[in-house]
Image (cartoon, rainbow, N blue to C red):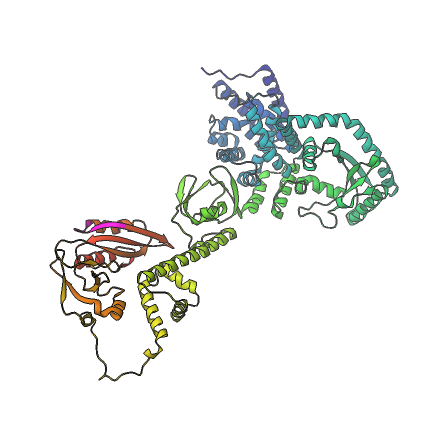
Amino acid sequence: MEEKFEFTPEEKAETLALASKLKVAIGDTLKPGDLEKVEKHVMSSIDKGQIERNIFGLNPILCSFQTADIAVEEIGMKRDGVLAIILFPSVLSGHAEMEYVKDTFGEDVYHIIHGLMHIQELYKKNPVIESENFRNLLLSFAEDMRVILIMIADRVNLMRQIRDTDKVEAKKRVSEEASYLYAPLAHKLGLYKLKSELEDLSLKYLEHDAYYMIKEKLNATKRSRDAYIERFIGPIQKKLEEAGLKFHMKGRTKSIHSIWQKMKKQKCGFEGIYDLFAIRIILDSPLEKEKMQCWQVYSIITDMYQPNPKRLRDWLSVPKSNGYESLHITVLGPENKWVEVQIRTERMDEIAERGLAAHWRYKGIKGESEKGMDEWLNNIRSALENNDDLQLMDQFKMDLYEDEVYIFTPKGDLFKFPKGATVLDFAYHIHSNIGNTCVGARINGKNVSIREELHSGDTVEIVTQNNQKPSTNWLNIVKTSRAKAKIRLALKETQVKDGLYAKEMLERRFKNKKIDIEESVMNHMIKKMGFKEISEFYKQIADNKLDINEIIDTYVKTRDHLQNPNANLPARSAQEFNFENPDEAITKENDDVLVIDRNLKGVDYSLAQCCHPIYGDPIFGFVTVSGGIKIHRKDCPNAPELRRRFGYRIVKARWSGKGSSQYSITLRVIGNDDIGIVNNITSIISKEEKIALRTIHIDSHDGLFSGNLVVQLEDVSKLEDLLKKLRTVKGVKQVTRL
């Protein structure tokens, strides 16, 4: 039986104290009945056993009041934000319906809680939080900016409460998220106090020894450090007053976290960090004299102390892109210690303190450089200070992120793409080979095509196939220049590869026909065929746009013409012209007819492999060197050459009765690469009587497929019937016998 949730006396006392404090702080924004409804809701949750302590054993109700206190004190949050914080734990645990929240507390509270729930969904994707992209996704995903502010306040409170917990791994994870995610978010939003607290607590929990070493040394040197600041400021203050300037000065010690970061960067000990503090001189200056008076202060200080010219930062002449204006110098003060001095006016300091500058760019926190981000954050900070309705910031958020989408990998990595980017863009962003073989994707578990557009928060898993190849129309699918460049490179590599394959195939066919390739003859033929580039010639062979047998015939004619220029004799008269019948030429030396029958004895014959004759084909015999006879089709690609060079070895031949012999032939099929087309083709063959499919080899590219089918059948009539049926299949463009 589960233990019933109960408040400890200490927790009850603290909760009541915080409730009273919050009532005073936001009482003027509360609506009639708010307090009673919240109290009733909380007590009902406790009575029904709907409240459970979290992994650290913390009381979620007390935590929500502590978070609300931080949100009010440090951020200036009012009624809607506070109620959302207190109600969210019960909604998250499923013990309060969203509709109940809307009906009882209004639309604004509902929208804030809805935004918090939305971001919880992102966390379920196991994101890699140590990335600028995830911070930006949170900003773009929050339906109301108060959602992000509440998350920061909640994390500050959690970091305060887990100091003594024994849950080491959970504490480490929470601290890493505070360091990588929430501190930079607080920094961007100008919440510097919360940002420093998150960083220091993260260091305290993650690198305990380093934190306490620096803290002890700071405590040990505090008195001497304060005294040094007084000694440094004193003479400067006197000189500035003598110059008639209105100003005030303050010194600030760097945070423990920033000191530790500097120690690691400079690879030195605590004693090696000289700029443990900075002096800020803020002038009360009229607008037209700002720059002049800042440079006047610079002149006075550098006359007193030696400056380091390498450390001069002039953001007066050219302000930073975020609007930050100031003059930073580093001088060698008393006792040969380097001191950083920041010189600015009240106006400049106000802009800087609004969170617009916050020095987050030059302090190593890489952020967006777009002007839109700075303007947006500045407006958010203004709204915080003026207690404006933060929902007004939604338009800035929409304007800022309208051209960006953030996408998860299945492992939780996050990538940024321009709006309109597709699955194919994502595939090429991961790796060129992934892109080249991409056939689609699963977005949030749903199968989609390579053309599918991406949307922020999508989890995308790319689907690949080894036989997939890029095509030129892919260039119209992708949005990013990176993907376009990779597709063009892949197409070029494919063209070169296909060209080499086509060249090898052509050379092999020439060799089979015992025809030597002469480079000069080949180049002459290619040029005569109208190709300006040899690569284009081989590409058309690879794409099956040129028939190799026709190329060989053309080559032979070209070679013979080049080798026998006397062939161009004057035209003969009709009386001298004698018609030569190919069939007659076959029997020129032998009038006997060889009858081909499977029971033929005494004659060594076989069917030629170059043309695969079958029963019914017009045929002839060719006496080989070994004395055997090869049977060729009369339209065999090699027939013209055999007749021309070896006419005396050719004999007439014909088939005897049909018999029951089966013959193997190869069919070349080309068509659209449509779903099911291959199944349709094989289905037709399987339904034919006395026809058997032996092998099938299919290749697919650029939306087309081409393949060779080896079938066994009885005669030409069966073949013709099969060809007619295959040509009627939807999507089949060409069926030929090889």
Q: Quadrant of the N terminus?
A: top left
Q: Observer-nearest residue: 700 or 180?
A: 700
Q: Observer-nearest residue: 248 or 431?
A: 431
Decide if residue 608 is on the left or right side of residue 556.
left
Decide if residue 568 is on the left or right side of residue 587.
right
Q: Quadrant of the C terminus?
A: bottom left
236 is higher (above) or lower (below) than 557: above
Q: Observer-nearest residue: 372 or 28?
A: 372
Decide if residue 654 is on the left or right side of residue 95.
left
- The residue depicted at 77 percent of the width and 27 percent of the height is 221
Residue 733 location, quadrant = bottom left
176 is higher (above) or lower (below) than 489: above
Magenta highlight range: 687-695
Q: Give the total number of marks visible in the rendering.
A: 0
Decide if residue 738 is on the left or right side of residue 237.
left
Q: From this viewpoint, is residue 547 visible?
A: no
> Looking at the picture, how far across and down is residue 240, in whole percent?
85, 41
> Looking at the picture, how far across and down is residue 463, in whole percent?
41, 44
> Looking at the picture, how far across and down is residue 506, in whole percent?
36, 61
536 is higher (above) or lower (below) than 315: below
Residue furthest to the right: 242
Q: From this viewpoint, is residue 266 visible?
A: yes
Per the image, is 694 magenta?
yes
> Looking at the picture, how far across and down is residue 555, in whole percent?
35, 68
Residue furthest to the left: 657
Per the image, is 616 magenta?
no
